[in-house]
Image: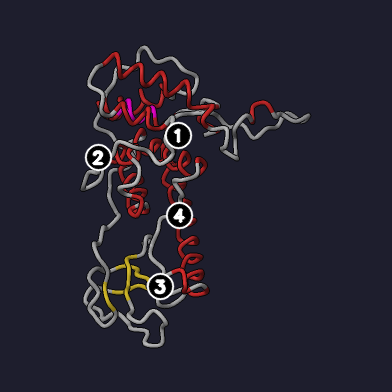
Amino acid sequence: MLDYTAGMPIDELAPRISDIVEALEAWNDVDQLFQQEAALEFPEFGSYEYGGAPDFSTVFDYENTLQLLSIAILLRDLRSVSRIIYMLRTHRGQDGLFEQLIAGYAEDENNLDTCVLGKPFDILLQVFYEDNEKATLNLLHKYLKQWYSAMKDHPRWYNEHLKVNEEGYAGYYGYWSFEAGAAVFLLDIDDSQIDHLVYPKDLVDYARKLREENRFTSRENEVISVSGCVEGGQPCRQTGFWETPAKLHSRAHFAQGEIMPTFSDSQYGSTIWQWSTEQ
């Protein structure tokens, strides 16, 4: 984001998004281990169930997730978009704006009319349901006007442009409502009248150019969606890495048809294997 703010060519920035999504996956994997260990230490709160690490109830996690997803959409990096959706599969059906952003990439649709955090995100959500062009632009202007003030609880960068130290350094790396840009791109809205300092117009133009030229930053889809789980003692359904809350650090590779192990001494009872988010 700092390089984007500094004006680095988007063609040079685009290939870097994949590594950033990889870093999110690494954080998510560590969080799963934490959740598993917590479930073993405090069984009274229930057994471990997979849950994507980002917490949509905090503006920090929510906005960061929307920004990353929206950048991947605007860069037409379908593989990264798919990886984010798969990682956050447990967040489905909770937030209307997230659902609308991924609607064209997910196998199923969840049309919700509310956002977890409410304002101002529900204003942008209305854009996806508005048919009148003038009303749509009014909603976008309203959202962009309220966006920065709504970030006052964002612990990393809010007002960092006012905190330059004596050496000339600050935590500022750019204020961008990438999710507004993604909405404009997905809905093919005329943004010629949108001139706001947090609106990433050049990135939206870049996305449109890629679409016109039928180009992608990445279009391969390496994320394998495996519905359900596999019980220990049953054959593996898909070659890859699997994990089970019945044993700490259980992540292992199995071939399709291989019999999945059972841990009879586990306090969980049955051994249920789940597809690992990292392959």
Secondary element type, mark 3: loop
State the residue at coordinates (34%, 70%).
242
Label located before the other in sequence (4 or 2):
4
**Tags 1 and 3 touching, CB below 8 Å:** no
Pinpoint residue 263: horizontal percent, then vertical percent.
37, 84
Depth check, mark 4 against mark 1: the one in front is: 4
- Residue that numbered label 1 is attached to: 12
Label located before the other in sequence (3 or 2):
2
Q: Residue furthest right?
A: 166
Q: For mark 1, does the 10 Å Cα neighbourhood hold few (<14), some (14 to 19), or many (20 or more) residues?
A: few
| Residue interval drawn in magenta | 180-185
**Viewer-nearest residue: 54 or 16:** 54
**Viewer-nearest residue: 118 or 206:** 118
**Tags 3 and 2 touching, CB below 8 Å:** no
Amino acid type, residue under disc 4 in the picture: Ala
Quarter occupied by residue 241 = bottom left
Separation of disc 1 and disc 2 at Cα?
35 Å
- Residue that numbered label 3 is attached to: 245
Depth check, mark 1 against mark 2: the one in front is: 2
Label located before the other in sequence (3 or 4):
4
Pinpoint residue 32: horizontal percent, then vertical percent.
45, 63
Amino acid type, residue under disc 3 in the picture: Pro
- Residue that numbered label 2 is attached to: 111
Q: For mark 3, does the 10 Å Cα neighbourhood hold few (<14), some (14 to 19), or many (20 or more) residues?
A: many
Separation of disc 4 and disc 1 at Cα?
29 Å
Q: Is residue 95 above or below residue 234?
A: above
- Residue that numbered label 4 is attached to: 53
Depth check, mark 1 against mark 3: the one in front is: 3
Pinpoint residue 127: horizontal percent, then vertical percent.
31, 26
